[in-house]
Amino acid sequence: MILLDRTPEPVTVIVDRRDDQAFTAALLASHHLAQGRITVHPPPPRPSPTDLAYEILEALGKPVVPLNRQRWGAAPPWAVSAAWIAGLPVTRLTVLRAHLLPLPAWKYLLRLREATAVPLTVVFHGPQPYAAPRVFDDVPHALIDDLETVRLLHPPAPPVPPIRYRTPGRWITLPALDRLPHGGYFPDCTCRHPPPAVISHVARLKPLTPAVLREISHRLATRTAHPYLAGALATAVFTAAAESQLATVRLHDYDPDRSELTLHDPNRVTHQRRCATHTVPPWARPLITATAHLALAAAPRAGAGRLRLFHPPAFATTPLTEFAEQCRLRPPHPWFIQP
């Protein structure tokens, strides 16, 4: 699955022959999610492919419990990891203790590199001489074995003042979610793409303050590992779309280069009374982009005209309204029972 039309750069292989703590400390100190630098420290003794995928998701700040480790195996966590890496975006992925990875984990890791073109660094520790796994036979790679070069490639993360968020259990009231569970019929639309009307906000919705938008973005990004849930609910927040309307959005209705998303309403069910192209706000772009990459990875051979952007994958079992409850987001007249 190739999500990005880019050729990945050669894999950087760090050889820590003495298993020096300074190597590990420098690489862990370089981890900085806001700058796209992700360092993964797999647990011993030999992480399985599924375990490694979950370690990557945790390093990306995503909860992994909803993915149900026992039921779904390795494939969905790796697809979700690839989607988040492509959407955030991640500028470098570093995996420590790479000499402990079994061959299946290596194969998944290198597929992730091919799918996202993420710069990959792997670290071999220990006194044994470096021996590249067979999977490296056809993979370009470069060796590094001195600490100073490692520190130049992986600079320490800058100090960042903590961001204050609201109490996690505090509700945020959003009029845009009033129609989310609306079950109206939205048939496939044949309107010209994109529709001529371009709008930056939905009429009659009070603009949200930067602090509230920052809080909403934080909750959507940290309370699910599913790009589908985060991207769909983010879209509902800035478009006031119903869940049934979101289900009709096609993959090519999202233009990441122009940050535009088209919603269709040929039967004039909603208050928009037409199809419309919305400007995607900056806080929602990574979430929707990750959703698009996951949709493309789920059916890479299907045409973009047939792929649905917000079609829930088989392993996303949480309803969108239930996820809104988990994020403590509600409309003025809640459609659920509050505790």
Image (tube, rainbow, N blue to C red):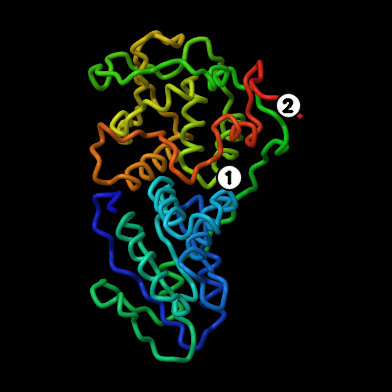
Residue under the point 70% across and 36% down = 166
Q: Marks 1 and 2, Cα distance to the nearest angstrom?
A: 22 Å
Name the spot of residue 253 as percent of width and height, x first.
Answer: 31, 28
Give x and y (percent) for residue 317. Answer: 53, 41
Amino acid tagged 1: Thr
Residue at x-position 27% and y-position 21%:
194
The label shown at residue 222 is 1
Task: Pick the residue in front: 290 or 282.
Answer: 290
In the image, residue 323 above or below residue 56: above
Does dot 2 land on a helix, a strand or a loop? Answer: loop
Q: Nearer the viewer, mark 1 or mark 2?
A: 2
Tell which residue pokes out farthest to the right in this image.
339
Q: How crowded is mark 1: few (under 14 residues within 10 Å), some or many (20 or more)?
A: some
Q: In which quarter of the image is residue 134?
A: bottom left
In the picture shown, does residue 180 fall above or below 140? Answer: above
Q: How many marks?
A: 2
Q: In which quarter of the image is the C terminus?
A: top right
Give residue 289's quadrant in the image.
top left
| Residue, disc 2 | 338
The mark that comes first in sequence, 1 or 2, is 1
Q: Residue 73: where, in percent of width, then height?
A: 48, 59
On residue 138, which mark appears?
A: none
- Dot 1 lies on which element? helix
